[in-house]
Amino acid sequence: MNYEIQNEYIKAVIDSGGAQLNSLKKNDEDLDYIWCADESYWNRSSPILFPIVGKLKDDEYIYDNKKYSMNQHGFARDKKFEVVKKEDDCVEFKLTSSKKSKDIYPFDFELFLNYQLKENKLIVSYKVINIDTKVLYFSIGAHPAFNWPLEDEAKDECFISVDKKEAYRYFLKDGLLADNTYMNCEKIFLSEEMFFNDALVFNDDINEVTFQNSRNDRFVKMNFKDFPYLGIWSKPSGSPFLCIEPWHGVADSVDHNKKLEDKRGILSLDSKNKFESSYSIEI
């Protein structure tokens, strides 16, 4: 079911299926900044990544000497969330662990997603509560897809600028972290070819990314202070969308031992404690 929120500047539509952002527009325009989830290219628009981010080595992990299987980016994106709060400019969703989820992820948790409009920004907030008696190990991340190009300009006229001149980049091999290097990223001109070897993955305290073009003043600005990883991705097949993805967590490395507690970027949360984080999208 879709839920619309609106203020005097912008409006957004969020689906309780996956608590996924489906639309983000200015009130005086028809242009949607969010990808329409056309299944002929990619059938999602802004999935939540939980309880893992990225791919597991052999799609499995080990916890408490037991092996579990889980697909890339986890299962929350495919679950129906409960609506726990709805106001004109705000909506909040909740997902709770179940017997079925514990078959592949043996932890009790509550996951909250809150969408709040503030002027021309959408603020997306995460809250994870450990309702288990043991330490909760998890990752969480965003995957919003924006129309690329934003309007009628050519795709290669679009670029990304970040708040660092140089950042530490990982290269992926079969979805897993492999080689790494430093990359000049102050201004990255976009092309389909740059995604032939999967996503660009950074780990260097990047706090802000702006996606725009060279010919007009349209832009998307994402601020995600305290998210240690960033993914930038599109399908290398002429797909008309670009994903900008702040993450708490990342894919396994090619030499990972598969133990959940040893996973790169994994978060740990003591019993009855909570984790909170947020990012914003400005248009």
Image (cartoon, grey):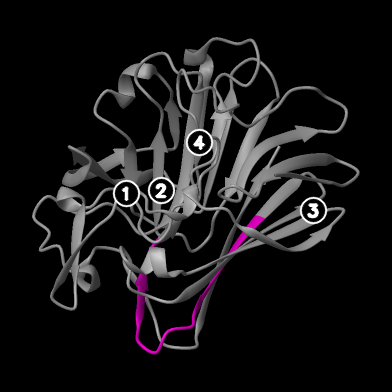
* Image quadrant in which you'd find residue 81: bottom right
Residue name at image x 40 percent, y 64 percent? 101
| 65 sits to left or right of 133 | left
Amino acid type, mark 3: Lys
For label 2, the SS is strand
Residue position for label 2: 230
Judged by depth in the image, the label closer to the viewer, 4 or 1, is: 1
Q: For marks 3 and 1, give the CA distance.
A: 30 Å
**Relative vertical location of residue 154 with respect to residue 88 in this rendering, above or below:** above
For label 3, the SS is strand
For label 4, the SS is strand
Image coordinates of residue 129 in percent, x first then y, are 52, 77
The label on residue 118 is 3
Mark with earlier residue (2, 3): 3
Residue position for label 4: 161
| 7 sits to left or right of 161 | right
Front residue of 53 and 186: 53
Amino acid type, mark 4: Ser
Mark with earlier residue (4, 1): 1
Residue name at image x 79 percent, y 53 percent? 118
Mark with earlier residue (3, 4): 3
Image coordinates of residue 226 in percent, x first then y, are 49, 64
Amino acid type, mark 2: Leu
Judged by depth in the image, the label closer to the viewer, 2 or 1, is: 1
The label on residue 54 is 1
Q: For marks 2 and 1, give the CA distance.
A: 11 Å
